[in-house]
Image (tube, grey):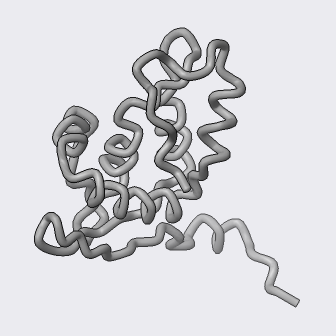
Amino acid sequence: MSKVLTHDEIAGAQDLALERVHVSEWGGDVYVRGMTGAERDAFLASVIDGQGKVVLDNLTAKLITATLVDETGNRLFTEDEVSTLAGKSAAALQRVFGVASRLSGISREDVEGLEKNSEGGRSAGSGSGSPLH
């Protein structure tokens, strides 16, 4: 039988995964960190526009912006720099995105659930499907 954790053990647990990912297109490795619950909720909320529609534009770059960190866990990019990442190689972004979504517990079902719960479904301009596996 497993140990039952206490409040202090849960609160003090270092539970954010950090994974090193090789990105040959960028000439080296990067660190990807899983998001906290609050960061994940904020990310999911950020893909809903003011009218309750899901906006998939730059979804990949938004997630990578939130999870690409240095070796100590400090973010490398801000929300204002999403377009910088969006302009990078799609293959490189997809590789990093796959790790970021896995470490953060974000699945295709999460985005599809947002689409179903939004009033009008996807917004115009989001013609491509979700990059989630």
> Residue most toward the right?
1
Percent x, y of residue 78:
24, 41
Q: Quarter of the image holding residue 119? A: top right
Task: State the residue in front, 55 or 5.
Answer: 55
Asked whether, in this view, residue 75 is left or right of residue 126, the answer is left
- Quadrant showing the C terminus: bottom right
- Quadrant showing the N terminus: bottom right
Task: State the residue in front, 36 or 48.
Answer: 48
Q: Residue at horizontal 38%, vertical 30%?
A: 57
Task: Say if 76 sits above or below 9 in the image.
Answer: above
Q: Residue at horizontal 35%, vertical 35%?
A: 58
Percent x, y of residue 95:
36, 63
Task: Say if 43 sits above or below 107 in the image.
Answer: above
Task: State the residue in front, 128 or 9.
Answer: 128
Task: Say if 105 sits above or below 124 in the image.
Answer: below
Percent x, y of residue 11:
60, 64
Q: Quarter of the image holding residue 13? A: bottom right
Q: Residue at horizontal 38%, vertical 74%?
A: 19
Task: Say if 69 sits above or below 80 in the image.
Answer: below
Percent x, y of residue 75:
26, 54
> Residue most toward the top?
51
> Residue most toward the bottom?
1
Q: Residue at horizontal 28%, vertical 36%?
A: 79
Q: How many marks?
A: 0
Q: Quarter of the image holding residue 97? A: bottom left
